Image (spheres, grey):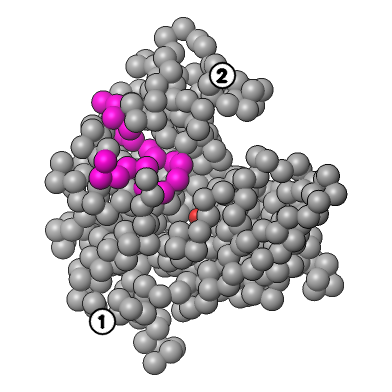
Amino acid sequence: MSFNVLNSAKHYLKQGLKAIGKEEFFEFLATPEQVLEVNFPVKLDDGGVKLFKGFRVRHSTVLGPAKGGIRFHPNVNLEEVKALAFWMSFKTSLANLPYGGAKGGVIVNPKELSINELQSLTRAFTRAIANNIGPDIDVPAPDVYTNPETMAWIVDEYSRIKGSWQPAVVTGKPLNLFGLQGREISTSLGVQYVIEALLETLNKKPSQTSVAIQGFGNVGANHALLLFKKGFKVVAISDSSTGLFNANGLNIEKALQHKKQTGKLKGFSQQGVKEISNQELLSLECDVLVPAALEAAINEKNVASVKAKLVVEAANGPVTMNADEILFDNNITVVPDILANSGGVIGSYFEWVQNKQGLAWSLENVKSMLKDYILKSLNKVQSFAKENNVSLRTSAYALAADRIINALKLTRY
Ligand code: GLU
């Protein structure tokens, strides 16, 4: 079953605008500034040639250059990329960054390509969008199934086109090629800081807190590891092969080793560990549920079974609009994606500033700056929600929309 995530995005926008009495900006904020579709050939290892389709959607540049990742996934489609680009504008606005929002995607299953083919595809896509990206225009980053290596190919290809190194054209680069200490874990770190801050207000210690994490990609796996090291009880994790459960907490270091060796979580056998389905993971009796995979993971079909007290959206758009209402009615607090996973783009911002200025910050510096940024966002979202008696999501959308609208009035009217 497929869900139209763009509808959810627009619904949340409407609620946010209503909270600030600025509904007249709906059409402007719901519509991307630019939509680019490219089709490009890639030479395969067997000598054949295959045509691929990709997108780059620039949602907004009202607050600065557009910013947002590129994903490689077989289910990428234009509606989805539009929703993801929209979310980036709201994420950067809320985090108080000097950016707008964008997103890109290529319809491809990267697991079916060799490393050479993947490099050729990335370079060909970069050439196809080269006139539309740039350090002060639109700055890509990693997303689902793209990583620092992908960014290395992009920065190299783009710099060859321009005839000089352009490190600030993408973020999330390898540490040895203009990267930032901690960028790979910055999304996960941000989610951790948000969870810790919320638990502190509840007076709950990590050892008393059970967490279930759906998704074991860059964000889910790093988040599970960070929480494990902090003494949280990570009772469940999952990837596309299986879910794993242990009521007393899983050993995430060992699970990661298994994943690295075999490529999947399935088959990880340790005392007390049980394999569970994705659906069982979402329905677990636990304190915190972290959807860290794809959009629409929690939807009208399965939302009734969610029993966690707190849902923290590490993925983009993991809760559909109908499910969101039911969670609210069931008194389950949801920390929205544009706040919860903003550590990623905050880290990207530090990398971009570092590249532009030729600086190199320490990991400690990055962590403390990131914490400062994301907790400021959390505080203002909580205060507005309380004052206006709205959900954290509506509050986040209201504040993010307001900042864009205020800049819009100063510049484009
Ligand atoms: N792909 C990440 C996100 O969805 C990071 C984007 C970025 O750093 O530009 O937030």
Residue 407 at what x, y percent from top left? 40, 81
Amino acid type, label 1: Glu
Q: Quadrant of residue 201?
A: top left
Please give the residue where the numbered disc 2 appears in the rendered image: 254
Does the magenta segment cover residue 298?
A: yes
Tell whether circle 1 marks a residue whose Cβ is less than 8 angstroms from ligand 1: no
Q: Residue at x 30, y 23 (%)?
A: 208
Q: Is residue 45 left or right of residue 384?
A: right
Residue 212 at what x, y percent from top left? 37, 30
Please give the residue where the numbered disc 1 appears in the rendered image: 24
Q: Is residue 129 above or below residue 364?
A: below
Q: Is residue 126 above or below residue 316?
A: below
Closer to the N terminus: mark 1 or mark 2? 1
Q: Is residue 297 left or right of residue 391?
A: right
Q: Secondary structure at mark 1?
A: helix
Q: Residue at x 40, y 83 (%)?
A: 408
Q: Is residue 48 visible?
A: yes
Residue sitting at the far front: 48
Q: Secondary structure at mark 2?
A: helix
Amino acid type, label 2: Lys
Residue 20 at what x, y percent from top left? 22, 73
The magenta region covers 282-301
Q: Residue at x 37, y 57 (%)?
A: 5
Q: Residue at x 33, y 71 (%)?
A: 401
Does the magenta segment cover residue 399?
A: no
Residue 105 at what x, y percent from top left? 58, 58
